[in-house]
Amino acid sequence: MTDAERLAAEHACEKLMRQFANLNDARDFTGLAALFAEDARYARPTDPDRWVEGRAAIQAAFEGRPATKLTRHIVSNAVVTVDGPTEASGVSYVTLSAGPAVETGLVKADPALIGGFHDRYVKLDGRWLFKERKGSVVMTMAG
Amino acid sequence: MTDAERLAAEHACEKLMRQFANLNDARDFTGLAALFAEDARYARPTDPDRWVEGRAAIQAAFEGRPATKLTRHIVSNAVVTVDGPTEASGVSYVTLSAGPAVETGLVKADPALIGGFHDRYVKLDGRWLFKERKGSVVMTMAG
Amino acid sequence: MTDAERLAAEHACEKLMRQFANLNDARDFTGLAALFAEDARYARPTDPDRWVEGRAAIQAAFEGRPATKLTRHIVSNAVVTVDGPTEASGVSYVTLSAGPAVETGLVKADPALIGGFHDRYVKLDGRWLFKERKGSVVMTMAG
């Protein structure tokens, strides 16, 4: 791989992490599922030992959650390692603020959670996708 | 556009969002205004339905705010879509911590606000600039 | 320098800031020290006027700190300026959440600190490294 190809791969995987968060917060779970390879697996931060297997099951798992909370998943500290032309891995931190999904006015969030993801990525048909995404939660912020 | 041109455009617009925040916090409003196209418009997060039209008016609006607060606008979740060689759009989240602008010692911030921006960018004379920047505030963090 | 070289330099230095934070939180101080040039100097955010000189001394300073806290250094607002083929400078914000390093369960963090770094970078043997890193702390978040 050339340096330019590596840079493009890193940027694409970094963007994938941010798109995941934004689509999750927007409850666009069709868009979110499209960031995963067909045979990807996902373990949510609050249940990191239980894998959800396959894009369709991942989408269903997200859709099954009640829409009672407005969320903002703030992504930071992304570091991607390109392991080959179609393989990469990466880590990031996520700070989650969530509060009651009211219709008007400013939402008062609960104390934020800080966690993160360990990911594997795959390039399919010219596009980088999640192959594996394992979450964790490590800390609550003061509140 | 080549993939390399798209990547360069995305990175430039992502950087623009961070520069805006840093220059705002530094109260360098000349520098901040220079990130906007001459005919750009801006709606601040706390007043999202009122457009400030034109670079000079945007600068004046920032300069008109009292310097009573020390601020840190933390930018995250930037996702840029390149719409053409000279046009792009993007979103980001912003977490604002602000406290009394004292001269010495550690400032105690008020509970943080989480919001964001929807942007349009334009490339003029080889440089990406804000064409339109519309803010929003959605949440207060626990405090 | 070409535009592509500048972009690669900016991305490398941005990544360096995130790697520093992640390795610090993982207490991998050998890895952290390897991000610095042999003759680099470092001033920690809570003691910004005292330079620690040289990679070995920087590593020793980190290793000398007690492992009583679990930390998450959240990096944001990175803006890098490429000053030449082997020189660059940059700024970033860091939000630090830290709590007691317990072995199990969710850590309750103390009120977060917001600060940042002013950096100089150097390219040696094809790799961007910290040449100088000066920290600061400006604010505590509500808690």
Image: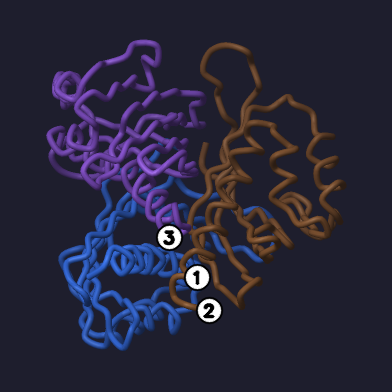
Chain colours: A purple, B blue, C brown
Compared to residue A52, the image places residue C43 above or below, namely below
Q: Mark 3 and 1 residues: CB-CB less than 8 Å, in contact?
A: no
Q: Mark 2 and 1 residues: CB-CB less than 8 Å, in contact?
A: yes
> What residue does disc 3 label?
A4
Q: Which mark is residue C1?
A: 2
- Residue at the image point whose x is 63% and y is 34% from the top: C25
**What x and y, as percent, mark residue A122?**
32, 36
Element on which disc 3 rests: helix
**What's the chain of the residue with tag 2?**
C
Specify few, some or many for label 3: CA neighbours under 10 Å numbering under 14, 14-19, or 20 or more.
Answer: some
Nearer to the camera, B85 or B107: B85
Task: Give amino acid for label 2.
Answer: Met
Quadrant of the rendered image containing residue C26: top right
Element on which disc 1 rests: helix
Task: Give amino acid for label 1.
Answer: Glu
> What residue does disc 1 label?
C5
- Residue at the image point whose x is 78% and y is 52% from the top: C47
Distance between mark 2 and mark 1 Cα atoms: 6 Å
- Residue at the image point whose x is 17% and y is 71% from the top: B84
